[in-house]
Amino acid sequence: MREAVFFRDPLWPEEWIDTRNLLHWHRTKVYGTRPLQDVTRIVIHHVGVETKLEGIQLCQVTARFHVQDKGYPGIGYHFMIPRTGGIFLSNAPEVISYHCGEIYNPSAIGICLEGKFTEGVEPTYHQFIAAFTILQGLRELGINWTLVQGHRELRPTDCPGDSFLGPVGWKARLFSEELGEAREKIQSMKATFQKIIELAQIGCKNPSHK
């Protein structure tokens, strides 16, 4: 029986969930992998439609769409963040998944936030905290990304919405001082994040091929 893997940190009320065992994967296609030092950018995405799905369901629906409709080996993102917060791992950082184009995929980790961020709509505070935690947690683990970009900065797309860039865009809020409470928890969460990443490295090409 397939199960999700749940982690909890004493200073972090929301769950960190490894969803890979619950996702739909292509029967024959497999993503390639890379050394972690090849990761230089984090690419931010949004779902782009309004949903009323729980976090695991959100990952499952996205994975099935990517495999069945787009022909991908698996879900395109490495992390998904529902409106209520929490961190949902869907690919190991080593995996070269498809989410921002053939040129950029080998150097990128994809983070997708639930929602449609247009006409001034922004992520929730819990989503900002989760995204900040992923960014800082990856760096703590030695993944020295130098760029955080929206999908639309790399490809002709609206993703992650027209509210991302500009003088009042929410891109800058990913590094805002208002997220300081997450900063104080990073050291505590580092061990939890490390455990997740270590487990993610097991069979990281495609969990369905174990």
Image: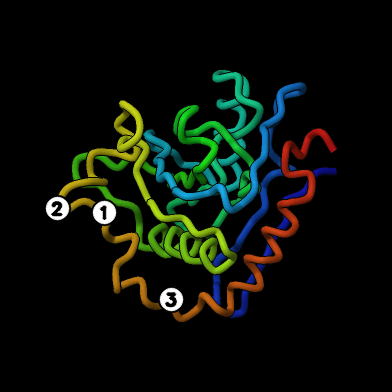
Q: Which residue is mark 3?
A: 183
Residue 142, x across and y down, in percent: 57, 64
Give the SS element for disc 2: loop
The residue positioned 55% from the left and 58% from the top of the image is: 143
Distance from label 1 to label 3 (Cα)? 19 Å
The residue positioned 54% from the left and 69% from the top of the image is: 140
Residue type beneath disc 1: Trp
Kindly check if marks 1 and 2 are in contact, taking CB atoms under 8 A apart as contact: no
Q: Which residue is mark 2?
A: 167
Q: Nearer the viewer, residue 157 or 22?
A: 157
Instruction: Check the picture and name the quadrant holding the C terminus.
Output: top right
Q: Nearer the viewer, residue 28 or 105?
A: 105
Distance from label 1 to label 2 (Cα)? 9 Å
Q: Which residue is mark 1?
A: 170
The residue positioned 62% from the left and 45% from the top of the image is: 90
Q: Residues within 10 Å of mark 2 (few under 14, many from 20)?
A: few
